[in-house]
Amino acid sequence: MRCATKRRPAKRYAALAHRIIDEMGYRVVAIGDSAQIQQVHSVKRQMKHHSIDFAGHARRLSHRALARANPQKRGNRPPCR
């Protein structure tokens, strides 16, 4: 059983996704385990851009799968600070 946690409203996650897409040009990948599917879909409903949905499929994720989902940004990491 999971402990109850504080969560930010879905609209704040959607706003963050908009900034990532609009300002940085990245695609957004929504991830979460099977218990988080409803929360992920709540965020996606409030987004104006498309996102890739791996909610409930977190075990299938790999760096290779994420790279295929976002090929134009492969290897383009921000500088370390």
Image (cartoon, helix red, strand yellow):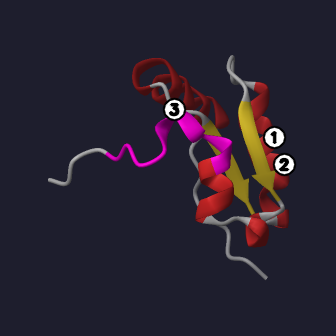
Callout 3 secondary element: loop
* Residue 44: % across, % down: 75, 33
* Magenta stretch in the rendered image: 68-77
| Of 56 and 72, the residue lying toward us | 72
User: Which residue does the numbered mark 2 point to in the structure image?
Assistant: 38
Marks 2 and 1 sit apart, C-alpha to C-alpha, by 5 Å
Image marks 3 and 2: residues in contact by CB distance under 8 Å: no
Image marks 2 and 1: residues in contact by CB distance under 8 Å: yes
Callout 1 secondary element: helix
Query: Residue drawn at (58%, 40%), measured in percent from left and top?
Result: 71
| Of 74 and 39, the residue lying toward us | 74
User: Which residue does the numbered mark 3 point to in the structure image?
Assistant: 26
* Residue 26: % across, % down: 51, 32
Q: Earlier in the sequence, mark 3 or mark 2?
A: 3
Q: Which mark is residue 41?
A: 1
Quarter of the image that includes the N terminus: bottom right
Q: Is residue 31 magenta?
A: no
Marks 3 and 2 sit apart, C-alpha to C-alpha, by 24 Å
* Residue 39: % across, % down: 76, 47
Pair 3/2: label in front = 3
Residue 7 vs 16, above or below: the answer is below
